[in-house]
Structure formats: C-alpha cells, structure tokens
Amino acid sequence: MKKLKIGVAGLGRIGKIHLNNLLQLSNVEVIGVMDPSTEAVEYAKLKGVENTYTKFNELVTNNQLDAIVICTPTNTHANYVEASAKLGIQIFCEKPLDLNMQRVKDVLKVVDKSKVKLMIGFNRRFDNEYRKVKTSINNGKIGNPYIVKITSRDPSPPPLEYIKNSGGLFLDMTIHDFDMARFIVDKEIDEIYVKGEALIDQEIQKVGDIDTAVVLMKYVDSTLAVIDNSRKAAYGYDQRIEVFGSKGMVQANNIKVDNSKLYNQNGIISSLPMDFFLERYMEAYKIEIQDFVDSVINNRGVSVTGIDGLKSLQIGLAAKKSLLENRPVKIIEIK
Ligand SMILES: NC(=O)c1ccc[n+]([C@@H]2O[C@H](COP(=O)([O-])OP(=O)(O)OC[C@H]3O[C@@H](n4cnc5c(N)ncnc54)[C@H](O)[C@@H]3O)[C@@H](O)[C@H]2O)c1
C-alpha cells in the first residue's frame, strides 16, 4: 500500500497532538516536520521523525509531500497555505485561516486555482457527543429546532502574549462555537448581538480584549441561538450544547474525568469535567485527522471547507463590530 507522505508544520500544543495521531495511522508516513523551536524539533526526533526543519520552505520543497498539516501560529497560516497550494500539496490547516476577510478570500482563490484540498481544523465537528445531537436533529427527533444553546468556558485564560495576537475572544475561542452553531443545524446565521466584558482579569482589558461574553444570534430562517463564553470556569472546561425544538430537546453534556460519584449526608459529588481541549477532544482530533487523510487518499471533498472557515470568521468579525458599536449586526455587513 502506498503511504501518504505528510509534513507537519508547527509543533506546539495542537501540532504535537496531530503529529502523534498521524504517527498512529498505517496509511501515512510523516516525512518531516518544521518548527523554529529546538524543543519542538527534539520532540519530533524522539518520535522518530527523521527530517526536521526550522523553515517552512525547506519542509515543503525538500520532500515531495502529498499533504501538509499546518499548526503554526495564526499569522503564518495564510502564507503557508498559499505556498503549499502552489506546490500542489493537499492541506489541513488549523483554525483560523487568517483574521482578515479579504486575505482569506485571496487565499481561497489560490487554493481553488491550484485544485488542492483545504480542510480547516474545526475539530468539534468530529466529537461523538455533538454528532449524536446532530443525528437526532437530522432524524427529526426534536422536530423543528427553535433554540440552539452553546456553553463554552475554558478552565483558565491563555497567557497575555497569546491573547494579544489571538484576534480576541470571538476570533480565537468563540469561532469554534460559531462553526458549531452553523454545523449542528445546517443553517446560516443572519444577525448577531453580543455583550462582552473583562470580568476575570483587567490585564485582558488592557490588551483590548474581553474574557466573558454572551452572544445572541438569529439564523436566516429565524431560529435563535445563544452562546456563552468564559475564559475561566472554576470547575474546569465546560462544553455543552442543547437544541430545543417543536418535539423535544437534545443535549450533549460535559464528559467527566470518570463516572464515579460520592453520596453522603452533604449531597452527591461527581468528578469534574475533563480538564481542557487536549483531553476533552482527544478522540475528535483522531477522527478529524483520519478524515482528512481519507479525503486525500479517496480523492473526495473535505468535511470542513475553506468557506466554512470564512463564514465563521465573518460571524466573529460581526461579533466584534456588535461589541464595539453596541448594536445588532447583520452578518452581510462584513464584506
Ligand atoms: N482546533 C483546535 O482545537 C486548536 C487548539 C489550539 C490551537 N489551535 C490553533 O492552532 C494554531 C497553533 O496554536 P497552538 O496553541 O498549538 O500554539 P503554540 O504556541 O502552542 O504552538 C505554535 C508552534 O509554532 C511554532 N512557531 C512559531 N512561529 C512559527 C513560524 N513562524 N513558523 C512555524 N512555526 C512557528 C512555535 O515554536 C510553536 O511550537 C493556532 O492557529 C491556534 O488557533 C487550534
């Protein structure tokens, strides 16, 4: 069996996850990795990857890659995707593609022209709990959806240095929820209104961001959605979805560290939710990267497209505008 030759760019938190998952796949050969940090390069060598580079160009021009997995900081994605597309390399790129709509549109044109695949890393679409919610909705189990409720709270904020370059809460964190809101009911968003504050850490406000938000959205068919976000939940990573419809309701609740419960005269105590995204979505990341590999091997369309990336960015930018101007914003206002 011919193995797919894959390179991995960027070996930080998410790059290491993708590398490890790729190394488990029998139809893949990880040909090389790139990362400017010595620690990352050493990590790859320990994992048995022979070719390590500190420059992106060296990775993509030296190895006749079939595909690349891009996990570098956000501000490098657009350039790296364009460079890979021009070389005819199939691309998986972490979210977001870029923080600027025009730049994303330009990149998508290059990708289209090069006729390569581009899949965006919205890993939550591959989570089994959310898939069950979607299947129930698709099978008519809750009738017509009326309200989509997404709770997405992190256990603690990232470092200030990360926040400064992240594009802000809506483009860094809520972008996953915007994508989920579209995915779970297969509908587009028409309008958004947000309230956001820095309630956890004033330093976050000083760098121009918020850490707590409530988002209200209307889909094109008038279905409603609400998202609540926090950068710090005292009890850990809180990830829940509920969809309420004409015939009932379907929920995906937190997955706990274990299923044990302590019952005594004070009440019933259960374990906390899984700590953070690397644990909570461990399975989803595996299914996601396998899905990308399958799409390349079987030459079929990818499950999460560049347009999906563009749409969630557009909603995120509309959210920022709503916060700034303190008013409901139509998604089409963001060109
Ligand atoms: N889908 C998800 O669940 C998810 C989770 C986390 C991060 N992300 C996205 O993945 C990307 C990386 O995030 P992270 O949390 O792994 O960051 P990170 O800071 O942990 O890792 C980034 C890595 O890239 C390397 N790097 C720095 N500059 C580089 C450059 N110019 N070229 C190549 N490599 C460079 C760094 O040395 C580091 O190893 C971001 O775009 C982020 O939005 C997605």
Image (cartoon, grey):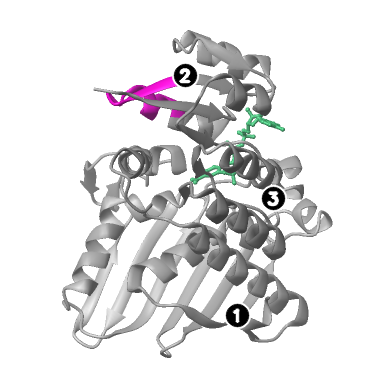
Q: Earlier in the sequence, mark 2 or mark 3?
A: 2
Q: Which mark is residue 31?
A: 2
Can residue 96 be seen here? yes
Q: Which residue is mark 1?
A: 331
Viewer-nearest residue: 265 or 182: 182
Label 3 residue near ligand 1, CB within 8 Å: yes
Q: Which residue is mark 3?
A: 166
The magenta span reads 19-31
Please name the amino acid that badge 3 sits on: Ser
Label 2 residue near ligand 1, CB within 8 Å: no
Viewer-nearest residue: 140 or 225: 140
Labels 1, 2: front one: 2
Q: Position of residue 302 (x, y in %)?
A: 38, 52
Please name the amino acid that badge 1 sits on: Ile
Q: Residue at x 64, y 54 (%)?
A: 107
Q: Earlier in the sequence, mark 3 or mark 1?
A: 3
* Ligand 1 shown in quarter: top right
Relative to 256, say whether 189 is above or below.
below
- How far apart marks 1 and 2 lie (CA) works out to 42 Å
**Is 99 a magenta residue?**
no
**Is 27 a magenta residue?**
yes
Helix, strand or loop under label 1: helix
Helix, strand or loop under label 3: loop
